[in-house]
Amino acid sequence: MEEKEEKKSKIRVKMREQDPLERARNFKEVPYGYSPEDAVEEASRCLACKKPACRTGCPVEVDIPAFISLIKEGQFLEACYKVKEKNALPAVCGRVCPQESQCESLCLVGKKGEPVAVGNLERFVADYEAEKGEVKIPEKPKPTGRKVAIIGSGPGGLTCASDLIQSGHEVTLFEALHKPGGVLIYGIPEFRLPKVIVDREVEYIKKLGVELVLNAVIGNLYTSDELLNDHGYDAMYIGIGAGLPMFLGIPGENLNGIYSANEFLTRANLMKAYLFPEYDTPIKKAKKVAVFGGGNVAMDSARVALRLGAEKVYLIYRRSEAEMPARKAEVHHAHEEGIEFVLLTNPIRFIDDGKGNVCAVECIRMELGDPDASGRRSPIPIKGSESQIEIDAAISALGAKANPLLPKTMSDLKLNKKGYIIAEEETGMTSKRGVFAGGDIVTGAATVISAMGAGKKAARAINEYLKWKYWDFRN
């Protein structure tokens, strides 16, 4: 019996999921989530370590053992409140964070088996709180009289706003689009992160007292100096992400039917093109689609294309599957749904059907050489290995660069050679007084949780800055 119990403790409780063939043709969420019984069983695998390594792997500093212990005791609401002491977006993080390379990678249970499913448990308590309708809003602190402008309502901006409003400052969140959420709303598909979840998390931030201003392109509507000097803001946090798409740079890339992942996913997610003509945002429904890249965005693009009716979706990646930066769960789901992985392959040109439409892509086979700066083995073309794949649509998912719209209006803001804002890692402080920055606009394209971690660090630094901001005028 003891041996059976020990074996059981090595395996995590799996979440039930939609059948792969069924879900490949709908936009409903893939996993169903834990039941209360599942959550208690999984939480019981936690060893409640005296020196929990998992906490050091969480960029937003969640007290992981404490909230899991509350789940063990069946105190699900209290567990959610414990998470929200540090993380204002638990339903999001529980769904899209790469826990396997962060908190779960340091879990001691994972040394001899599967680590405790921290992400699944976080999702459970957040959904439980919403289902019970017992969302707890912390008491408002005494106002400090200070005002902070947050530029960008993505995960980093939302986190920074949440922390600052709970410090007593007046906080305004400026969003360029007509819906808040940043990459959570325009980049991540419905089947991975339902938009009702994002709306729910944003509503919580608003209930904390944060003012939200939509359709506000800072750098156009207002400059940073106008906000800081004319509108009374004492500090600013820039969390605008990296929204400028990258392309392959090969012949034929301007043919009809070729998208950047940014455009493709924005049309499908934010503009609900998958519900056309109910929503008047058309998107090409191709039969054979090629997606280029190996990250989460590539997986999202391929799986969306499949759900839009593609008969064949090729995921073309120049390295092997072992080098793919995408989450293992996303790669697994893509395989299950029938995405065809074309590995160690690189596109070299698109082919015109004679009418300005893409009809094929010519590729070359690759082999792996020595590791490059990323630590992964470099792909090297194999001469004479060219071949063509017939397609009628293509999506480039190679990542994104810094959008220059806001930075170019700030002459005293230092940028690096790639156009990203230079900011201190631990504080987000930039070269411009009172201006802080974090997330993808500083680091380049990264994860939701890393942007949240940057927002949290910046909020802490802004608090300190607001304490001494006016001191030098008193000397």
Image: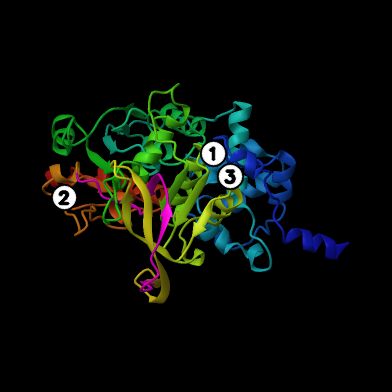
* Element marked by disc 2: loop
Q: Which residue matches tag 3? A: 122
Q: Which residue matches tag 2? A: 413
Q: How far is the residue under mark 3 from the one under mark 1? A: 18 Å
Disc 2 to disc 1: CB gap under 8 Å = no
**In the image: residue 107, left or right of residue 410:** right
Residue 471, x across and y down, in percent: 18, 45
Amino acid under label 1?
A: Phe
Residue 12, x across and y down, in percent: 69, 55
Q: Residue at x 75, y 42 (%)?
A: 37
Residue 155, x across and y down, in percent: 40, 42
Is the residue 166 above or below the residue 471 in the image?
above
Residue 372, x across and y down, in percent: 36, 73
Amino acid under label 2?
A: Leu
Q: Which mark, by number, is residue 191?
A: 1
> Dot 3: few (<14), some (14–19), or many (≥20) neighbours within 10 Å?
many
Closest to the observer: 405 or 463? 405
**In the image: residue 82, left or right of residue 160:** right
Most distant residue in the top direction: 278
Is the residue 377 above or below the residue 54 in the image?
below
Amino acid under label 3?
A: Glu
**Is-magenta flag for residue 384?**
yes
Most distant residue in the front direction: 354
Q: How far is the residue under mark 2 from the one under mark 1? A: 39 Å
Question: Which residue range is magenta in the image?
Answer: 380-404
- Closer to viewer: mark 2 or mark 1: 1
